[in-house]
């Protein structure tokens, strides 16, 4: 027997292919082997950019003695949570139920039937800070398996029964639509946890609340509540000027370990940056603050430059760790600076100026006298800043770069396509829109097969082996619909419709709610469904967003009704915990406002058409959907029958496909 990960497409699994642990990928063969040997399954779940996953791998999985014990007493299964969100969801639910918390790396012990009887997260190599050592945990579990088997199997069965009962009620189609008063109450509830000093919600650690901010922006557009916009503005400014934002190259880190956005956990995720690019664009649209436009375009440029793949898609993540000059793997080594390093690159005068501007101090804001770079105010001398920034970037490129998880995840690429289409049009960057089109072509040609199945991942042009979950269908369809609006090409509408129809067919629960896995997907110990918007939109909220846009473009009552049911199914959670229902609440705002359809008709190469298109996209009405196309376009119902106005580009503003008289400007 040996390590079986060498043929994996997941970079995370490939990181473990040389471990002395005899890892198996997730699949029925591993569980058959566990039953044959009469041993439990040790399930380890993580992801490539996870700092503590690396730590546990180095301490335990690379250790010959620990590996030998694992190989003797367990069938060891390694899972990439980003590649198999369904498996991760099942056992994260179990971990949270059994321990009261969750995270990665996640360590679960399962029977050969997949039932969890023990769950935890990171375990150190030796006892530390009240945590048992990993070896102690393994020995205790082997003793329980061998000497208290009845108790072990009873625990596993009871856990699954309780999870199945709880899951049956989560997101089922029994909710009621969210009304205006409830959407306002959600913002009021958010305000009670708003940090008036440093922006964001709650205390440390602080995660960028992209979906919550989107909801609050839409609520402000409906109500003109100044307090709502103030929360968004304070949060956006604090994030953009803090250490969580890369002041040299753009792009946001995963979260801040402090409440003031100074010290990030340095990994960079595609979904965060896709969502934040749109939030900052929409904040700029609402306020005119140039910081919003700058950060939106810098974030998009960062994704093209550092996350783009050769095939035209976008990689999942950049690692938090990189090698320091001594060859040690250190979190943040690529990004942090000392004053002496600034002087070395810039000279004494510019070094001192940059240190003051970027708050790099002798004491440091990070570890070991290093500082993260912040930009509390715009420099008085922008030209000098651009020169300094360029020199620091050039010097930083000589450092060892963080590793990149270069698998393409369908859902996250869908989010990125939506961002590129919107930022590209509004900020007049046709190269960004072109990149979005290229990513869309990759998803359709590689991730969607002949029978319409959407696959979750690919890497180096090789498709993964796992079918897409609900969020993949919702986010990719939404990305394709953004391309319809930006390009007027009906092929994207056809493709989005095919994905949405499949989602309605194979993910629906029959009562208006949705499961996260398809009816024909691999059967796990429970069929997961989670309506919460956490790091990225939930499956049901991403589907609702796409269904609404599709209905606005096509006039489809079926898709509009499905969007209403989807939002209603997630409404109970959004009411109870609005911080974890941002995308659902944003979709509810669009539903409440009703679709406002804007058809912009004119030659695509006519600057006047482009100006009219941008003016339409500047509308902040929560339900606005904009499509641009040539006169005579067919295959896009919103554009059909729309012509020029006295030979000039025209905009048709419609509600439920009943249009006002065309106008030459908005």
Image (spheres, rainbow, N blue to C red):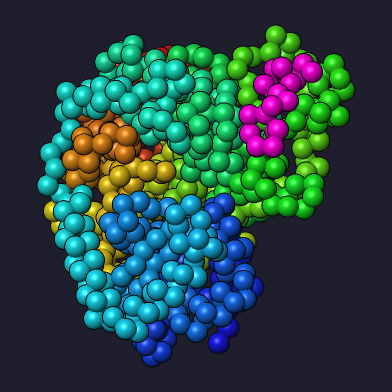
Query: Left of 13 or right of it: where is 214?
Result: left
| Percent position of residue 546, x then y | 34, 43
Side of 583 where 262 appears, left or right: right
Q: Residue at x 19, y 57 (%)?
A: 166
* Front in this rendered view, residue 517 or 37: 37
Question: Is residue 40 found inside the magenta-colored segment of the image?
Answer: no
Closer to the camera, 439 or 290? 290
Q: Is residue 91 visible?
A: yes
**Which residue is the extreme one toward the top?**
380
Q: What residue appears at the point 75 percent right and 30 percent down from the top-left corner?
A: 338
Instruction: Report the residue that reaches farthest toward the bottom.
Output: 36
Q: Is residue 469 above or below residue 61?
A: above
Q: Nearer the viewer, residue 419 or 661?
A: 419
Report the residue at 47% width, 28% height from top: 259
In what quadrant of the picture does the N terminus appear? bottom right
Q: Position of residue 144 (x, y in %)?
A: 34, 78
Q: How many marks?
A: 0
From the viewer's perspective, is 279 left or right of 64? left
Q: Which residues are magenta?
A: 352-370
The answer to whether residue 649 shows anywhere in this view is: no
Residue in the picture at 81% in, 28% down = 340
Image location of residue 547, percent across then percent down: 29, 43
- Asked if the stretch drawn in magenta spans residue 358, the answer is yes
Q: Position of residue 96 (x, y in %)?
A: 32, 55
Majority secondary structure in the magenta region: loop
Out of 246 and 600, give the one closest to the viewer.
Answer: 246
- Where 195 falls versus 115 (above or below)? above
């Amino acid at each position: 027997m040996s390590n079986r990960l060498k043929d994996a497409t997941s970079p995370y699994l490939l990181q473990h292919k040389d471990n002395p642990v005899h890892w198996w990928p997730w699949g029925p063969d591993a569980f058959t082997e566990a039953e044959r040997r009469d041993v439990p399954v040790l399930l380890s779940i993580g992801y490539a950019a996870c700092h503590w996953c690396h730590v546990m791998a180095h301490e335990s999985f690379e250790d010959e003695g620990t590996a030998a014990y694992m190989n003797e007493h367990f069938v060891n299964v390694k899972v990439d949570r980003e590649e198999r969100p369904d498996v991760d969801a099942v056992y994260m639910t179990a971990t949270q139920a059994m321990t009261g918390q969750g995270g990665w790396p996640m360590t679960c012990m399962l029977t050969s039937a997949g039932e969890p009887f023990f769950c935890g997260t990171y375990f150190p190599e030796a006892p530390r800070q009240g945590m048992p050592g990993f070896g102690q945990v393994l020995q205790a579990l082997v003793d329980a398996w061998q000497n208290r088997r009845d108790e072990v199997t009873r625990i596993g069965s009871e856990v699954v029964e309780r999870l199945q009962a709880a899951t049956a009620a989560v997101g089922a189609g029994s909710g009621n639509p969210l009304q205006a008063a409830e959407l306002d109450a959600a913002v009021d509830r958010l305000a009670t946890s708003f940090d008036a000093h440093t922006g964001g919600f709650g205390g440390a650690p602080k995660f960028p609340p992209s979906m919550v901010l989107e909801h609050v922006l839409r609520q402000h557009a409906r109500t003109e509540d100044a307090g709502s916009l103030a929360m968004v503005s304070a949060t956006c400014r604090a994030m953009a000027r803090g250490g969580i934002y890369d002041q040299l190259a753009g792009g946001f880190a995963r979260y801040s370990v402090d409440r003031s956005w100074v010290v990030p956990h340095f990994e960079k995720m595609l979904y965060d940056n896709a969502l934040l690019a749109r939030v900052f664009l929409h904040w700029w649209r609402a306020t005119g603050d140039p910081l919003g436009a700058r950060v939106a375009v810098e974030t998009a440029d960062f994704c093209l430059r550092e996350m783009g793949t050769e095939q035209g898609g976008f990689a999942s993540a950049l690692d938090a760790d990189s090698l320091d000059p001594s060859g040690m793997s250190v979190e943040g080594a690529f990004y942090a600076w000392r004053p002496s390093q600034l002087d070395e690159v810039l000279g004494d005068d510019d070094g001192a100026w940059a240190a003051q501007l970027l708050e790099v101090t002798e004491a440091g804001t990070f570890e070991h006298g290093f500082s993260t770079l912040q930009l509390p105010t715009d420099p008085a001398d922008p030209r000098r800043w651009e020169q300094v920034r360029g020199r620091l970037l050039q010097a930083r490129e000589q450092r060892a770069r963080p590793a990149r998880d270069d698998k393409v995840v369908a859902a996250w690429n869908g989010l990125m396509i939506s961002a590129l289409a919107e930022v590209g049009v509004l900020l007049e960057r046709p190269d960004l829109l072109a990149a979005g089109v290229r990513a869309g072509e990759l998803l359709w040609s590689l991730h969607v097969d002949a029978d319409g199945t959407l696959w979750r991942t690919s890497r180096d042009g090789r498709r993964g082996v796992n079918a897409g979950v609900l969020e993949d269908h919702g986010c990719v369809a939404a990305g394709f619909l953004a391309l319809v609006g930006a390009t007027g090409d009906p092929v994207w509408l056809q493709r989005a419709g095919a994905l949405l129809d499949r989602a309605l067919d194979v993910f629906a629960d029959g009562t208006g709610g949705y499961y996260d896995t398809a009816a024909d997907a691999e059967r796990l110990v429970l069929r997961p469904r989670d309506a919460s918007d956490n790091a990225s939109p939930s499956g049901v909220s991403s589907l609702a967003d796409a269904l609404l846009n599709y209905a606005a473009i096509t006039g489809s009552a079926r898709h509009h009704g499905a969007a209403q049911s989807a939002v209603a199914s997630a409404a109970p959670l959004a009411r109870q915990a609005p911080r974890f229902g941002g995308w659902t609440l944003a979709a509810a705002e669009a539903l409440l406002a009703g679709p406002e359809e804007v058809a912009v008709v004119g030659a695509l190469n006519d600057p006047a058409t482009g100006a009219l298109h941008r003016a339409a996209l500047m509308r902040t009405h929560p339900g606005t959907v904009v499509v641009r196309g040539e006169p005579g376009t067919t295959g896009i119902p919103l554009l059909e029958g729309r012509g020029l106005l006295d030979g000039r580009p025209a905009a048709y503003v419609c509600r439920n496909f009943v249009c006002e008289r065309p106008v030459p400007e908005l």
